[in-house]
Image (cartoon, grey):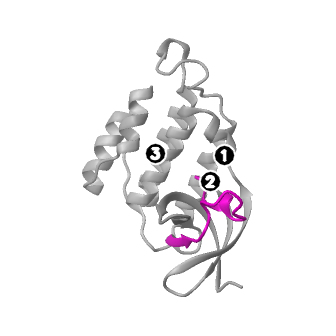
Amino acid sequence: MFDLEITAVNLRATDYGESDKILTLFSLERGLVTVSAKGVKKAKAKLKFAAEPFCFGKYQLAGTKRFVLAGCEFTELFYDLRTDIMKFSAAAVCAEFVLKSSGEEENPQLFLQLLKTLRELCEGTGHGASEGIGNREQGIGEDATKVLIDFLHKGLEYTGYKTEIKTLKGLKNYIEHTFQTKMKSLEGFLTLV
């Protein structure tokens, strides 16, 4: 039984206790939502998949203020992100941007842009782990970089900021100045390309 159903993407899962996790979901209806996922660290947990990074689906929540994960029907797991370090790193930058720029208010444009970006990263050809990270001559990660720059431009626009900066390094500096916070995942991505 659940009290609320939201369409959401899991952006962060933090270990809590022996078998639980605290999830930070980005939902279409409510923006960021924090959820306690009981028992998902156990080997045979039925909802283990719901705590995986970038799991997208309908999350059923119990409670009114402090939500507990009651169920999940996944739509997409974005598994291909886990097979390529460049794609996963770019997706992590997107997640960190949403976590730092959003609150508990809905932002349907940003939500839909995040889904579009995750799909593009999964379908794209920007590789990293299998072909040697950081090899600029072969264009490794070029697609992931283009997709990421597009997401950051649109993300800034959808959160009330607009810029014409074209480089990742420039965008990193702009975002850190605007939100007064470090973008650690973007620093990491920049070391890969």
Where's residue 142, x and y in %?
A: 53, 26
Q: Quadrant of the C terminus?
A: top left
Where's residue 45, x and y in %?
A: 69, 63
Number of the label disc, if any, that sits on residue 93 = 3
Q: Amino acid at mark 2?
A: Leu
Q: Is residue 173 left or right of residue 161?
A: left
Please say if the residues under marks 3 and 1 sit with CB atoms less than 8 Å apart: no
Secondary structure, mark 2, is helix
Q: What residue span does the magenta drawing correspond to?
A: 33-54
Q: Quadrant of residue 72?
A: bottom right
From where the camera sits, is residue 166 visible?
no
Label 3 crowd bin: few (<14), some (14–19), many (20+), radius 10 Å: many
Which residue carries the number 2 mark? 115
Instruction: Measure how far apart labels 3 and 2 are at the Cα level.
Output: 14 Å
Secondary structure, mark 3, is helix
Tell me which residue sits at (57%, 77%) in the image. 68
Asked whether residue 53 is drawn in magenta, I would say yes
Which residue carries the number 1 mark? 119
Q: Is residue 48 left or right of residue 148?
A: right
Tell me which residue sits at (46%, 57%) in the image. 98
Question: Which of marks 2 and 3 precedes in the sequence?
Answer: 3
Q: Amino acid at mark 3?
A: Val
